[in-house]
Amino acid sequence: MNPQAGSEQLRRCLEQTAPFSAASSTTLQRLVERGSLRSLAAGEHAFREGEPSQWIFVVVRGSLAATARSEDGRESSLRTLSVGDVGGLTALDPGATRSASLRALDEAMLAIVDKSAVREALASDPGFATALVAYLGEHVRSKTRQIATVLARVGRDPREQIALFDAKPYERAAFDRCSSDVLRVRWIEAKLDAASAALADGYPVVCAFVNDTLDATVIERLAAGGTRLIALRCAGYNNVDLAAAERYGIDVTRVPAYSPHAVAEHAVALLLALNRKTHRAYARVREGNFSLHGLVGFDLHGRTAGVIGLGKIGRCAAEILRGFGMRVLAYDPYPDESFAARVGVEHCAVDALLERSDVVTLHAPLTPETWHVIDARRLALMKRGAVLINTSRGGLVDTRALIDALKSQHLGGAGLDVYEEESEYFFHDRSDKVITDDVLARLMTFNNVLITSHQAFLTEDALGNIAETTMANVREWLEGRRGAALTNRVVRVATPR
C-alpha cells in the first residue's frame, strides 16, 4: 500500500470511529500524520502484556483476542475485539504499559495512532475531549465486566472445576453433597449470556440451566476462556447451539431423567386445581367469600386424557391418570406397545387424540418438529371445554393462538408451568416491576389459566438426582471420556429438510 493510500484509509477509519469522529479536520490531520496501518497474520501479536503502551488502536479488519496472565502464569481470555473496536484510550499517561496481549485470530489490520498525538489533541480540541469522556463513560460497563472477571479468579479454590450459572439457594445443598475434596463448584448468581460468559474464564466446565443462553456467541466466548464441557443440569437442550459447541470442541451433557414422577405429579396437580377451581376457591375464602358459584368442575373418572409424548415423564402421567379411572390416549413417534398393553393406553395420531380428549397434557421435548405442535388449527380440533396442560417446554404451544382459544371460550382452561418467552421472568422476583410482556400479561388475566414458574421439577428427590447426575457427567469428562464415550452426551441431529 502506498503511503498516500494508507493515509487516506487511516483518515476514513478515524472519521467513522468514535471518539475520533468528533475531532476537527485539523486534529484528524495531525492524528493521521502520526499514525499508520498495521497488517497482522493469523496468530501474530500486535503487542504483548507488559510492553510500553505507545499507541491507540482501532480494529480495521479481522478479529483479535485480548489475553492476560494470572499470578500462576495461566493465560486467560479477556475479550474478543472486532472491526470498529478501540483500545488503549484508558491509559494515556506516557509511562503506561500494556495490561494485556493482543493476538490476531485471523488476518487483521489495525489503525494505530501515537498516544502523545492523542494527548495533544485533547488539549487543543474541546470537541474531541468531550467525545472521549462520553466514549469512556459508555464503555465503563465493559470494563466493569473485565474487573468482575479478574475478581472471580482472585482467591479461587484450585479444586473449583465447575462454574455454575444462574445459581439458586435451593440447589446448593444437593450439589454440596455431591462435591468432594477434588471437585468443587463455583456458584455464580448471574444467568449465563454474552455479558456474563467471561466469569467462566479458567473453568473447564460450565454448568448451565434451562434458561441460560448458549448461542454461538456465548459458546465462542466460553471456548476462548478454556471451557471444554457444558454440563446441563436439565433434560432439555434447545437453548444450546450444538453446531457451535461441536465447532469449538466443547462436549455437552445433560440430565435426561431426574424425577419423572415430580413433573408428572405437578402436571396432574395443575389439572386438579384447574378442574376444581382450587386456586379461585382459596382466594375467595381468604377474603371471607364462601360462595360456591362458578366453582363447578367435572369428574376425571370416566373421562379421556390425551398424553403427547410418552417418554419417562409421559408414562408416569399416563399411569397417574389411569389411576383416576380415565381412558388414556397417547401419541409418541416411537410407540411402546408393551407399556401401552400393560397400563391400558391407546396409541393414536395427534389430531385424533385432540379430538377425543377432555384433558391434554404435553410431555414432549422441544425440537424443530415439535415447535408449536399445539397451534391454532390443533386448538380448534380440541373438544369445547377441554383443558390443556403443559409442563414440558413453552415453545410446544403457540401462545397467541392459545389466548384466542381462551377468549372464544372454546378451551376450558390451561395449566402452564412453562411459557415461550419465560426466561425474562421465570425463576426471578419481578413483583416490584411492571410486566412488559403483553402476551404473558394477557394470559395472567384469565381466571381459567393457572401459571406456575417452571417449578414442576422442584422436589427434594429431583434436585438430588439432578446434582448427582450432573456431577457424575463432570467426573466422567474429567477422567478423560470424550464425545460418544460420555454416558449422557447430547448428540446433534441434523434437522430433516
Image (tube, rainbow, N blue to C red):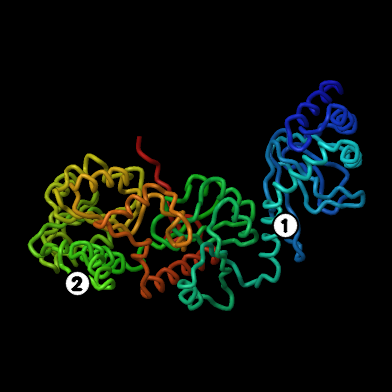
Residue 425, quarter of the rendered image: bottom left
Query: Dot 2 corresponds to which residue?
Result: 290
Near mark 2 (Cα within 10 A), the count class, few <14, some 14-19 or many ≥20, is few
218 or 161, nearer to the observer: 218
Amino acid, disc 1: Glu
Q: Earlier in the sequence, mark 1 or mark 2?
A: 1
From what the image shows, is residue 275 above or below residue 379? below
| Residue furthest to the front | 288
Q: Are marks 1 and 2 in contact (CB under 8 Å)?
A: no
CA gap between label 1 and label 2 equals 68 Å
Image coordinates of residue 24 in percent, x first then y, are: 83, 30
Q: Could you say whether the residue bearing mark 2 is in a helix, strand or loop?
A: loop
Q: Which mark is residue 347?
A: none
Which residue ends up furthest to the left in the rendered image? Answer: 302
* Residue 118 placement (x, y as % from top left): 87, 39
Amino acid marked by disc 2? Phe
Residue 86 percent location from the top left of the image? 75, 41
Q: Measuring 20% from the left and 65% from the top, which residue is drawn there?
A: 272
Q: Residue at x 47, y 48 (%)?
A: 242
Question: Is 366 on the left-hand or right-hand side of 329?
Answer: right
Which of the 4 quarters of the picture holds residue 497? top left
In the picture, measured across the screen, residue 144 lies left or right of residue 281, that is right
**Residue pointed to by mark 1:** 75
Taking depth in this image into account, of 167 and 318 the one nearest to the observer is 167
**Up/down of 319 relative to 217, above or below:** below
